[in-house]
Image (tube, rainbow, N blue to C red):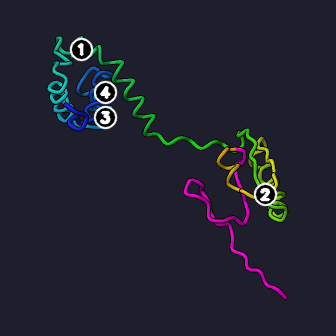
Amino acid sequence: MTIEDVDLNLLRVLDALLREGSVQGAATRLHLSAPAVSRALGRLRRVIGDPLFVRSGRNFASTPRADALRSEVAALMEQIAAVLTVPELPDPSTLERCFRIRADDAILAAIALPLLRSLEHDAPLVEIDFLPELREPYIDLRTTDTDLTIGVHPEPDADIDHEPLLVDHFVAA
């Protein structure tokens, strides 16, 4: 059997059954009907080749195979959640970092003071190193010595993210 042959939704059902110990409890946890969970349990039994849960008086009791799967299934569910969770963006007010920005003097004169004022209010622990422009603007970006380069540059290679900030026209008089 290959991974393409397995309905991975069954892992959610198995995890809920192992946590709750009953079809009704698993159904409530998963927001499904008890018959839907019962059908999924039947499919799990066929796939795993074990009854997983058996009647013990009025309750369900897990089989040794189900008990052996308990920690593995819980770990898998945590891994799946980690893969599918969007990471939170850092809070600027608590971010401690130094950013290195390269630009020519005219650009730095225009952006430095407003940027520093904004950071003072929104991200007080962030520092900015303003560095002079280089002839080869992309070398530092590739070596992570610079976080941002602002200037008039030729079209960068595909591995460099770039965004036009403005278009300016020169006029001679």
Residue that carries the numbered disc 4 in the rendered image: 16
Q: Are marks 1 and 4 in contact (CB under 8 Å)?
A: no
Q: Secondary structure at mark 2?
A: loop
Instruction: Tell me, yes or no, whether the two marked residues, 3 and 4, touch with CB atoms within 8 Å.
Output: yes
- Quadrant in the rendering for residue 3: top left
- Quadrant of the frame with the N terminus: top left
Residue 123 position in % (x across, y down): 75, 46
User: For this rendering, which residue is in front, 24 or 61?
Assistant: 61
Give the extent of the magenta segment: 145-173
- As measured in the structure, the alpha-carbon distance from the residue carrying label 1 to the one carrying label 2 is 65 Å
Mark 3 belongs to which amino acid? Leu
- C-alpha distance separating marks 3 and 4: 7 Å
Is the C-beta separation of discs 3 and 1 under 8 Å?
no
Label the magenta part by its dominant secondary structure: loop
Along the line of sight, the residue nearer the viewer: 96 or 16: 96
Q: For the residue marked with disc 4, what is the amino acid?
A: Ala
The residue pinned by badge 2 equals: 133
CA gap, disc 2 and disc 3: 57 Å
Q: Nearer the viewer, mark 1 or mark 4?
A: 1
Give how far apart the Cα atoms at labels 1 and 4 are: 16 Å
Q: Residue at x 77, y 80 (%)?
A: 170
Which residue is under mark 3?
A: 30
Q: Which of the two discs, 3 and 4, labels the residue nearer the N terminus?
A: 4
Residue 140 place in picture, x, y as percent: 70, 49
Residue 112 pos. (x, y %): 82, 57
Of mark 1 and mark 4, the one earlier in the sequence is 4
Kindly state the secondary structure of the residue where label 4 is placed.
helix
Label 1: which residue? 65
| Residues packed near mark 2 inside 10 Å, few (<14), some (14 to 19) or many (20 plus) | some
* Relative side of 5 to 128, left or right: left
Among the two numbered marks 2 and 4 on one chain, the one whose residue lies closer to the N terminus: 4
